[in-house]
Image (tube, rainbow, N blue to C red):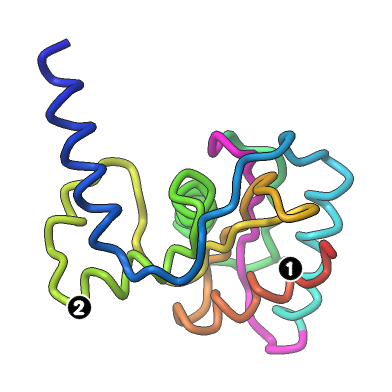
Amino acid sequence: MSFVRPCIALLSTLLLALPAAAQQPSYGAPITLELAKKTAAGAVAEARKLKLNVAVAVVDTHGTPVYLEVLDDTMTASPNFAFQKARTAAMMRRPSKALEDGIAGGRNALLSLPDLLMIEGGEPILLNGKLVGAIGVSGGASAQDGQIARAGVEASR
């Protein structure tokens, strides 16, 4: 128990140090399989348009895997990275790029947060203004992964 209190204090401090984009959304009901598939389909369509082989992962509000789609000839590490990016976006209620930007801005203490992948490509999924899950993409350059993930989010609306 003595470990929990310092971790909570560190996390609170680090979150306050992140770029403040907007009020973070409240959690909603976990994403349905139907919405997860619709979100992934939008991402896959964008990946095909860019001629990229990627993994697309969708998680619920707790970062638990809900859906995975891996295009042929995708790098074998990509599915794991896609889930980590999605989990980061869901648990932190912001795009994984926000954490990457925080580190680039000198917030190196963010690197001490466990089980997060602070690279562009993870995006929160909102339904009626509430966070229901997140999508993560891996296989292209991080900016391309972000573009593909945002296309997935757009398809979920």
Front position in the image: 56 or 93: 93
The answer to whether residue 42 is left or right of residue 85 is right
State the residue lying farthest toward the top: 1
The disc label shown at residue 105, or none: 2
State the residue lying farthest toward the bottom: 50
Q: Which kind of residue does numbered mark 2 sit on?
A: Gly
Q: Quadrant of residue 148?
A: bottom right
Q: Quadrant of the N terminus?
A: top left
- Categorize mark 1 by other alpha carbons within 10 Å: few (<14), some (14-19), many (20+): many
Give the secondary structure at mark 2. loop
The answer to whether residue 123 is left or right of residue 50 is left
Closer to the chain start, of discs 1 and 2, is: 2
Query: Which residue bears the numbered disc 1?
Result: 152
Q: Quadrant of residue 70?
A: bottom right
Give the secondary structure at mark 1. helix
Front position in the image: 130 or 136: 130
Q: Residue at x 61, y 61 (%)?
A: 55
